[in-house]
């Protein structure tokens, strides 16, 4: 029964995100400026239905971004907990193959007024690296580092951002400073809404 409900939820989620063309969705999508806490015991929602978050840890402002192995586009393992001295905006999306996530990723890539020359822009999802590479090519995005949590699921688990019923990541935006300390965090309460990307951009700009 749980497996059936999870499968139905995925179908509903994808259908909700693919009913319209991307430009129409962008005009209609609400922007949520609130946030919920990450980690087990908390939840996000989809069209009002609660989706519990799971994880062995939880990302928090003022603390280091938890260590986690993720996969790069060339299938190499990358430790996302190593900032390498860079300020980062980490955009977390459930699936790039939905217009909502498409809009969020384009906003990360394009709506930053030159920030990409000073900081690193990162997108994390459960999408396979092959799908991420295809998305980046078709969207003509070359200033974002795409990382996948498909193999280890450590990012979702260690940050408390795993939507357990769907095996997808919650929609979130994280800003880390050059020492990998989380300085801004928004976990979007409603997964069909966009995050407040301008606020995340400003948080990153304040760290320069």
Image (cartoon, rainbow, N blue to C red):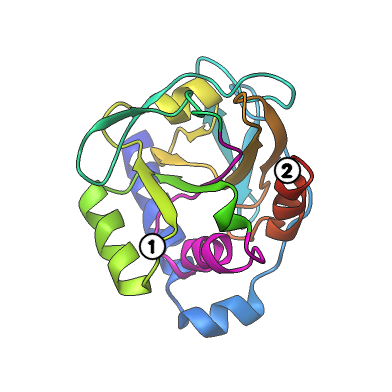
Label 1: how many residues lie within 10 Å, few (<14), some (14-19) or many (20+)? few
Q: Quadrant of residue 5?
A: top left
Residue 65 at what x, y percent from top left?
58, 24
Q: Residues within 10 Å of mark 2 (few under 14, many from 20)?
A: few
Residue corresponding to mark 1: 142
Q: Nearer the viewer, residue 107 or 159?
A: 107
Residue pictured at 54% horizontal, 25% vertical: 159
Which range of residues does the magenta coloring cover? 86-114
Of the two numbered discs 2 and 1 in the rendering, the one whose residue sits closer to the viewer: 2
Quadrant where the image shows the C terminus? top right
Relative height, residue 131 to residue 168 (above, below): below
Does the image show residue 156?
Answer: yes
Disc 2 to disc 1, C-alpha distance: 22 Å
Magenta stretch encompasses residue 202: no
Along the horizontal axis of the image, is 125 left or right of 134? Answer: right
Where does residue 34 sit, x and y in percent of width and height?
78, 48
Label 2 SS: loop
Task: Count every numbered label the image shows and give the total.
Answer: 2
Regarding residue 1, the answer to whether it shows in the image is: no
Name the N-terminal-most of marks 2 and 1.
1
Q: Secondary structure at mark 1?
A: loop
Residue 208: mark in rendering: 2
Q: Residue 134 got which mark?
A: none
Q: Position of residue 57 (x, y in %)?
A: 56, 16
Q: Residue at x 42, y 73 (%)?
A: 18
Find residue 169 and report its horizontal and vertical position in percent.
47, 41
- Which residue is rendered at x = 59% and y = 77% of the image? 26
- The verdict on residue 97 being magenta is yes
Q: Nearer the viewer, residue 91 or 101?
A: 91
């Amino acid at each position: 029964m749980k497996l059936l409900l999870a499968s139905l939820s995925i179908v509903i989620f994808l259908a909700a995100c693919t009913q319209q063309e991307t430009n129409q969705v962008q005009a209609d999508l609400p922007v949520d400026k609130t946030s919920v806490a990450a980690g087990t015991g908390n939840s996000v929602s989809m069209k009002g239905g609660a989706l519990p978050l799971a994880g062995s840890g939880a990302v928090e402002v003022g603390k280091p971004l938890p260590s986690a192995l993720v996969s790069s586009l060339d299938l190499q393992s990358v430790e996302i907990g190593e900032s390498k001295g860079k300020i980062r905006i980490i955009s977390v999306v459930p699936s790039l193959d939905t217009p909502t996530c498409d809009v969020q990723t384009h906003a990360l890539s394009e709506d930053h007024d030159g920030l990409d020359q000073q900081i690193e822009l990162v997108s994390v999802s459960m999408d396979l690296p092959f799908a991420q590479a295809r998305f980046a090519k078709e969207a003509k995005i070359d200033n974002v580092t795409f990382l996948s949590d498909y193999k280890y699921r450590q990012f979702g688990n260690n940050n408390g951002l795993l939507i357990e019923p769907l095996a997808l990541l919650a929609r979130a935006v994280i800003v880390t400073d050059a020492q990998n300390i989380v300085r801004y965090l928004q976990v979007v309460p409603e997964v069909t809404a966009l995050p407040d990307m301008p606020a995340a951009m400003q948080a990153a700009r304040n760290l320069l």
